[in-house]
Each structure stands twice: as structure tokens, then as C-alpha cells.
């Protein structure tokens, strides 16, 4: 909004107004405003939640300090969502299709989480929103994202042109200031289902490779169906995995901030034509604008830690956790880095896998031996360490350290090793 206002008042030649054209400046404003909103208005929202007696209902699982959390205000995800959306709408270019995809994702999954929390808190139904309706909402979002990527003319990647022999085509231009000739590769924008492969230089994965066995006129449709299924799977997986991870004070919040920072770096270099070429990355026109959104995301997550760190004054609830996970998934897909999700979202994947392993092994041993056995003392994994006697704050800090290591590996793997 303010960016478009800048384009209107630019003709007045006011000092400093020109800074608004720079993504880095608007991203800095975005993260600052999100921190201010979270920390200043967060306290008022927490007080309102307390007045409305919107507190957490805690099941007694025999965990140390668990019952002390009973009555702690929940639905704090409203603070996070507000801190993401307000700076984004103020500082991002609202004619950018990628910004609107992220805004829709935030509102869509935030609404699903809000309904779930509302049923738990106000209707006193501990089960919350039925699982099938959550999945339906996540699937619907996946279809919307896939359809937008397929139908929008603004969603393209920029590639070097090759001749019939596969050689890169060059072009000569003249520098207007020096009069010297400059040789560069000819580029063109194309619709594509390519995504980045870590480790491997100058190679991208094309979803069309998986449907080459089909007749030519079927390949395009089949590839997009496959791509849609991948998108749906990733949104559902990461959204629900983040929800599972949100079991200790500050655990999900801090981890999402680290993952968000990783995606911010990848989005910025993917949308910068010089850096993308230097680092052998796929260049995606106009994707750099997402740096403004992810800056707000990081600021909101870190700011929420002000109240959510141990001992938590507020919980994000499903309102926050479902939205945060979905944002990470959709953002990864948009910047075409979804193959790397197991790395920079490794904590969420591990937490989710621990539940799958626990349930599967329990059912298997119950059928085989007549009684269920467990791999972990309790799942998700963070509860296993609680059962072993580790302090909650120590578990959270160590999970953050692992998440930070995975983030560094992700960036190094993509930007340097390739």
C-alpha cells in the first residue's frame, strides 16, 4: 500500500521517498513493524484473552510442569497473523501475484486454526474441528495454489535461450555511457514445473520427467496433476507437523523463525538476477518481493517469543501453528525449493515421523504380541525427552540449535556446494 503511495508522491521529490523502491529497505521496515505490533499490541490481546477466559485446557499426561500451564491464554496466533498481514499489506507491492498467494495462505489456514480453537475453547469440545475438515481445508488451499501457479501468466521462470543444438544463444548490447559492446546470454520467460535440486550444479527437476511414458498430449495435464498432489501433500504435512511441534513453550515459534530466515535468504537470491546467475540458481522474476512478506513472518515469530518463551504467557493455538506451517510449505513451493523441505523443516518432519513410528509400532506389536509396545517414551519426540527428565527450556534450546544447523546446511548446500 505504501509502496503504491510512494509511486504517486515520487514526483514531489521529497527527501528519502526513493528508499521505498528498494526491497531490502521495505523488508527492514516490515520486520521492524511486525516486532512492534507483536510486542506492543500483543500484551493487549493477551489481556483481552484473559478477560474472555480463553485458556488452555490441559490433559494430564504425567509431564513435569504440565498442569501449571492450565488456564494460559491460547489463540495467540491472532497476534502472529496480524503481525504478518499488516506489514505485508503496507510495504509489499500489491500487484505481485506471489504476495497475494501468501496472504491467502495466511488467512486461509489461520481461519481453519481459529475455527478449531473456537470449538475447543468456547464450545468446550476437546476434539476441536474434525480432522477431515482440516484436511479438506488444506487440500483446497493446495488446489488453489496449484491452479494459480498453472494459470497465472505472472508465474514464470527466466531461462537462457538455447539453439537447436543445445548451445546457449548470446546477444550483443552497447553500453550507452561508455559505448562499449557487452556480450550476454539471451533470456526468455517460460511457464515451467521445474524445481531446484540441491547439490547438483546446473540441473533442475522437472515434474514432466515422471510422466514421459504417457502420450505427448497427456504429459502436460498429468504433470500438473502430479505437481498439484505434491503441493497438497507438502501443505498438509508441514502444516500438521508444525501443529504437532507446538507442544513446548517457544519450540514451534523459534523453529519457524529459523526456517523462515532460511527461506528469506533463498527468496532474495532467487529474485536477484545477478546473484541468481552467480550462484547458478533458477531466476524467478518478481519473487524477490516475497522478502517483504518473509521479513514480517520472521519478525512476528521472534516477537511472539517475547510472550511465548518459557514460561509462556500465551499459546499460539492452532490459529498460529497451522498457518505458520502452511506458510513455510507454500513459500517453499513458490520459490521452487520444495525438495529442500526435509532439511530446513527437518525439526517438524522429525516430530511428525516420531508420531507415525510410535503409532505404527504400537499397532503392529499389539497385533503380534497382544499388547502394544512403544519406541519412544512418548510422542511427539519432545515429550520423549521430557519423560527422560530433561528440562523444558533445555529441550527447546537444543531443538533450536538443531534447526539452526539444518538451516545453515540448507543454505550452504544450495548456494555453494552446487
Image (cartoon, rainbow, N blue to C red):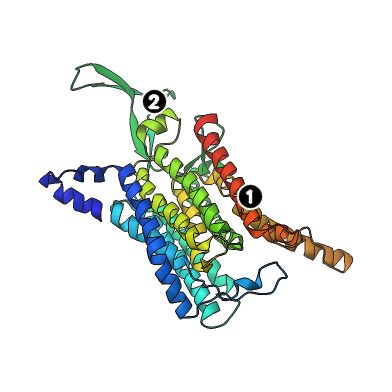
- Looking at the image, can residue 229 be seen? no
The foreground one among 219 and 263 is 263
Q: Residues within 10 Å of mark 2 (few under 14, many from 20)?
A: few
Q: Position of residue 266 (x, y in %)?
A: 45, 41
Residue at horizontal 31 percent and vertical 47 percent from the top: 26
Left or right: 374, with 233 as reference point = right
Label 2, label 1: how many angstroms apart (C-alpha)?
Answer: 52 Å
Residue at horizontal 65 percent and vertical 59 percent from the top: 392
The foreground one among 22 and 63 is 63
Q: Earlier in the sequence, mark 2 or mark 1?
A: 2
Left or right: 177, with 159 as reference point = left
Q: Position of residue 83 (x, y in %)?
A: 39, 60
Q: Position of residue 365 (x, y in %)?
A: 83, 63
Q: Residues within 10 Å of mark 1 (few under 14, many from 20)?
A: few
Residue extending farthest top: 180
Q: Position of residue 105 (x, y in %)?
A: 43, 60
The foreground one among 244 and 298 is 298
Residue at horizontal 57 percent and vertical 33 percent from the top: 199
SS for callout 1: helix
Instruction: Read off the residue under disc 1.
Output: 398
Residue at horizontal 60 percent and vertical 78 percent from the top: 126
Residue extending farthest right: 369
Instruction: Read off the residue under disc 2.
Output: 163
Residue extending farthest bottom: 123
Left or right: 278, with 72 as reference point = left
Amino acid at each position: 500500500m505504501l509502496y503504491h503511495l510512494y509511486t504517486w508522491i515520487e514526483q514531489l521529490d521529497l527527501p528519502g521517498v526513493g528508499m521505498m523502491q528498494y526491497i531490502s529497505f521495505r523488508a527492514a521496515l516490515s520486520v521492524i513493524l511486525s516486532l512492534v505490533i507483536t510486542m506492543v499490541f500483543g500484551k493487549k490481546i493477551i489481556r483481552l484473552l484473559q478477560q474472555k477466559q480463553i485458556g488452555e485446557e490441559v490433559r494430564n499426561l504425567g509431564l513435569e510442569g504440565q498442569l501449571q500451564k492450565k488456564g494460559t491464554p491460547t489463540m495467540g496466533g491472532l497476534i502472529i497473523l496480524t503481525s504478518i498481514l499488516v506489514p505485508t499489506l503496507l510495504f509489499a507491492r500489491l500487484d505481485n501475484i506471489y504476495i497475494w498467494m501468501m496472504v491467502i495462505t495466511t488467512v486461509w489456514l489461520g481461519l481453519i486454526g481459529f475455527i478449531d480453537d473456537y470449538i475447543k475453547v468456547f464450545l468446550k469440545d476437546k476434539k476441536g474441528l474434525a480432522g477431515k475438515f482440516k484436511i479438506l481445508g488444506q487440500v483446497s488451499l493446495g488446489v488453489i495454489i496449484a491452479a494459480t501457479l498453472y494459470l497465472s501468466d505472472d508465474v514464470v521462470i527466466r531461462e537462457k535461450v538455447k539453439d537447436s543444438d543445445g548451445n546457449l544463444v548470446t546477444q550483443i548490447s552497447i553500453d550507452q555511457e561508455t559505448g562499449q559492446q557487452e556480450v550476454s546470454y539471451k533470456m526468455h520467460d517460460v511457464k515451467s514445473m521445474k524445481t531446484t535440486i540441491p547439490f547438483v550444479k546446473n540441473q533442475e527437476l522437472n515434474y514432466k520427467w515422471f510422466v514421459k511414458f504417457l502420450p505427448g498430449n497427456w504429459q502436460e495435464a498429468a504433470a500438473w496433476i502430479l505437481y498439484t498432489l505434491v503441493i497438497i501433500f507438502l501443505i498438509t504435512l508441514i502444516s500438521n507437523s508444525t501443529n504437532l511441534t507446538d507442544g513446548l513453550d517457544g519450540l514451534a515459534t523459534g523453529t519457524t523463525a529459523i526456517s523462515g530466515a532460511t527461506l528469506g535468504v533463498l527468496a532474495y537470491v532467487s529474485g536477484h538476477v545477478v546473484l541468481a546467475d552467480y550462484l547458478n540458481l533458477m531466476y524467478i522474476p518478481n519473487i524477490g518481493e516475497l522478502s517483504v512478506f518473509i521479513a514480517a513472518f520472521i519478525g512476528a515469530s521472534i516477537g511472539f517469543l517475547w510472550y511465548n518463551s518459557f514460561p509462556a504467557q500465551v499459546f499460539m493455538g492452532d490459529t498460529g501453528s497451522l498457518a505458520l506451517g502452511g506458510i513455510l510449505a507454500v513459500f517453499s513451493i513458490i520459490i521452487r525449493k520444495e525438495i529442500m523441505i526435509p532439511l530446513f523443516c527437518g525439526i517438524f518432519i522429525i516430530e511428525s515421523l516420531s508420531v507415525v513410528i510410535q503409532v505404527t509400532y504400537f499397532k503392529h506389536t499389539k497385533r503380534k504380541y497382544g499388547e502394544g509396545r512403544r519406541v519412544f517414551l512418548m510422542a511427539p519426540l519432545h515429550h520423549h525427552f521430557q519423560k527422560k527428565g530433561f528440562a523444558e527450556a533445555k529441550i527447546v534450546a537444543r531443538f533450536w540449535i538443531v534447526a539452526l544447523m539444518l538451516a545453515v546446511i540448507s543454505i550452504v548446500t544450495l548456494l555453494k556446494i552446487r
